[in-house]
């Protein structure tokens, strides 16, 4: 067939043209791209590396990100979220007000402006948002929930895995302000419910909600959402249940830093060589001999840490919490210390916790002795079968005699509790029946109940009437992050095959690609048929849920001089959920080929049946 000069489709066409969308694909990913999501996002033309840990988002990526933002905006609106947009540059003065400046790390981006004022590229916005509310809001009833979606910054030591760990990233962060604890918990639960809808119901990701540490942000309790993936940097321990369990649906899950595990069956709960109840958080009388006894036990435990000797059935790890304050942690020699548990015992001193050795010890030092409850069990014996008599005797010798209820001031105190890292096959602390199983996850969302951590120090107050007088009190706060750019990569990490990406329809850059195989110019009958089908499909509504709807997004591959093989391979690499091919079957039997990218199944149907077919597909 003879073709005439190429005709251009109107710029107001309801579908996109591949020739006009910049998609710089690669045959192979750079060697530095070590994980599938990084490799595929590079190869499929979604991103390009700009610098160390920074990336350019190309047209396909911006479409996916916009759809993610639309989903988030819809869900935040449901829970009365108010969208804002705060500057990325934050004065260090605000961090000094909240006292976060003192505990800052090298990951914080800082610089001095021309006035020599120190500024921050914000990793989060607790301080500026709290300052904003402190100056301009005073409510006695309503919960105020402010959020934004924008770029954040963290000077990662080793940014890697592409968008999964970058120095510049896109995050949704919400900050809530409530007048009492009950309302704050209601807000917390509302945001958690919203995250579940986004991650599980809309995006249908393999997500687990876990208990988490509050970290440098602070607060009273915290939860994370992890997308389960083998490349995940975070370890997770969750209850696996048991065939004989009465609670097969136990939902316990925590990251490895926060998780706790039991080392005994419930029937053995009270069996032990030591009874710990009277010793928890007990102070003991000052006596140099007692101090020296514990130091000698610590020295023996440290020796056990560095040799293969099994003569001592415990180990000891040492920490300092400021000058003249030593912490000795005794635990089974086959377990490791959980530093988060140690920090929780130290209140304000927790931020200064450091590893130490006995060289820091002086006779004037205060000693805090923490004994892991694994040493209280009858099973806590050495390989030779002898229990830890020396440690037992030391605890008994150090017990406080009755002091008529008076608080005993002492430079030596003993606490017994769970100070070890939980491990796989420990017993679940929640149902006490299932065993903990280990998995890896990509953290994509985090929720913190902050309490008055920021509102108190930054004077964010509300008014209430008490006995006829106006009383001002700090707001109860929460903060809630969702990593938008990281979520994009996590979706690819869990939704791909050997051919490329498999986008969920709700966020795919385009829902359908239309190809004309055999057409060499725009006038060709197959090309004309492809244009008609693309126009027809782009008029269809796309309904992902009762609240998420719009038009079907269609792209027509109008590169008539490009080979069929290149077009087909590229369409699978990019991951359009559906591909409609107009080829030989269309010319002979008026049938088109439809391929489902997720299943790779192909169906031949008549063009006029396409709307009904896709209506059914999108409804699933």
Image: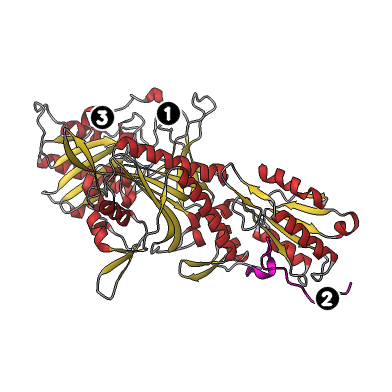
Between circles 2 and 3, the one closer to the viewer is 2
Dot 3, how many residues are within 10 Å of its Cα: few (below 14), some (14-19), or many (20+)?
some
Q: CA distance from mark 2 to mark 3?
A: 91 Å
Q: Residues within 10 Å of mark 1 (few under 14, many from 20)?
A: some
For residue 185, above or below residue 577: above
The vertical placement of 194 against 361, above or below, is above
Q: Position of residue 338 (x, y in %)?
A: 34, 45
Provide the residue span drawn in magenta: 1-25
Q: Does the stretch in magenta take in 334?
A: no
Mark 2 vs mark 1: give the one in front. 2
Q: Is most of the magenta stretch helix, strand or loop?
A: loop
What is the CA distance from the residue labelled 2 to the residue labelled 1?
77 Å
Q: Nearer the viewer, residue 551 or 309?
A: 551
Question: Of circles 3 and 1, which is in front?
Answer: 1
Which residue is found at the position 27% from the left and 56% from the top?
100
Find disc 2 in the rendering and name its residue: 4
């Amino acid at each position: 067939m003879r073709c005439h000069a190429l005709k251009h489709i109107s710029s107001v066409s309801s579908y996109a043209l591949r020739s006009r969308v910049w998609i710089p694909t690669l045959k192979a990913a750079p060697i530095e791209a070590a994980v599938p999501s990084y490799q595929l996002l590079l190869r499929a033309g979604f991103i390009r590396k700009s610098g160390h840990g920074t990336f350019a988002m190309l047209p396909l990526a911006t479409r996916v990100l916009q759809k993610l933002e639309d989903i988030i905006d819809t869900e935040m609106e449901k829970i009365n979220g108010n969208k804002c947009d705060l500057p990325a540059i934050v004065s260090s003065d605000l961090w000094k007000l909240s006292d976060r400046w003192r505990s800052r790390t090298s990951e914080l981006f800082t610089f001095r402006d021309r006035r020599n004022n120190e500024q921050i590229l914000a990793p989060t916005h607790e301080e500026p948002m709290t300052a904003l509310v402190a100056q301009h809001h005073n409510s006695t009833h309503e919960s105020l929930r402010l959020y934004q979606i924008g770029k954040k910054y963290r000077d990662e030591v080793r940014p890697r895995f592409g968008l999964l760990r970058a120095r510049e990233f896109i995050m949704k962060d919400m900050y809530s302000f409530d007048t009492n604890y009950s309302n704050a918990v209601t807000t917390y639960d509302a945001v958690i419910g919203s995250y579940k809808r986004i991650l599980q119901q809309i995006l249908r990701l393999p997500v687990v909600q876990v208990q988490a540490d509050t970290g440098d942000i602070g607060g009273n309790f915290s939860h994370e959402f992890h997308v389960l993936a083998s490349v995940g940097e975070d370890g997770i321990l969750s209850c696996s249940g048991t065939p004989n369990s009465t609670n097969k649906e136990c939902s316990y899950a925590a990251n490895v830093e926060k998780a706790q595990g039991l080392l005994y069956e419930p029937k053995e709960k009270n069996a032990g060589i030591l009874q710990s109840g009277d010793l928890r958080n007990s102070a003991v009388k000052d006596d140099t001999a007692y101090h020296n006894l514990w130091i000698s036990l610590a020295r023996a435990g440290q020796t056990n840490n560095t040799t293969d000797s099994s003569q001592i059935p415990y180990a000891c790890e040492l920490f300092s919490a400021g000058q003249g304050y030593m912490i000795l942690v005794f635990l089974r020699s086959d377990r490791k210390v959980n530093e988060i548990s140690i920090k929780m015992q130290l209140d304000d001193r927790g931020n200064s916790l450091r590893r130490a050795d006995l060289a820091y010890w002086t006779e004037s030092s205060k000693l805090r002795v923490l004994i892991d409850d694994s040493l209280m069990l009858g099973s806590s014996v050495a390989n030779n079968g002898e229990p830890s008599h020396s440690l037992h005797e030391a605890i008994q010798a150090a017990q406080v005699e009755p002091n008529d209820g008076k608080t005993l001031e002492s430079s030596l105190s003993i606490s017994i509790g769970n100070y070890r890292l939980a491990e796989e096959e420990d017993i679940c602390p929640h149902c006490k029946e299932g065993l903990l199983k280990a998995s890896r996850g990509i953290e994509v969302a985090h929720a913190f109940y902050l309490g008055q951590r920021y509102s108190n120090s930054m004077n964010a107050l509300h008014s209430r009437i008490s006995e006829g007088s106006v009383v001002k009190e700090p707001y109860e706060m929460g903060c809630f992050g969702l990593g938008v750019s990281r979520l994009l990569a996590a979706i690819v990490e869990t939704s791909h095959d050997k051919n490329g990406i498999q986008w969920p329809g709700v966020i795919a850059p385009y829902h359908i690609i239309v190809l004309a195989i055999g057409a060499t110019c725009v006038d060709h009958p197959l090309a004309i048929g492809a244009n008609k089908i693309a126009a027809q499909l782009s008029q269809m509504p796309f309904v992902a849920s009762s609240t998420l709807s719009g038009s079907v997004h269609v792209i027509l591959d109008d590169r008539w001089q490009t080979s069929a093989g290149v077009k087909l391979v590229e369409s699978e690499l990019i991951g359009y959920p559906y591909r409609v091919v107009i080829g030989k079957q269309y010319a002979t039997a008026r049938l088109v080929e439809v391929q489902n990218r997720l299943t790779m199944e192909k169906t031949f149907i008549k063009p006029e049946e396409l709307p009904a077919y896709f209506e059914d597909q999108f409804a699933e």
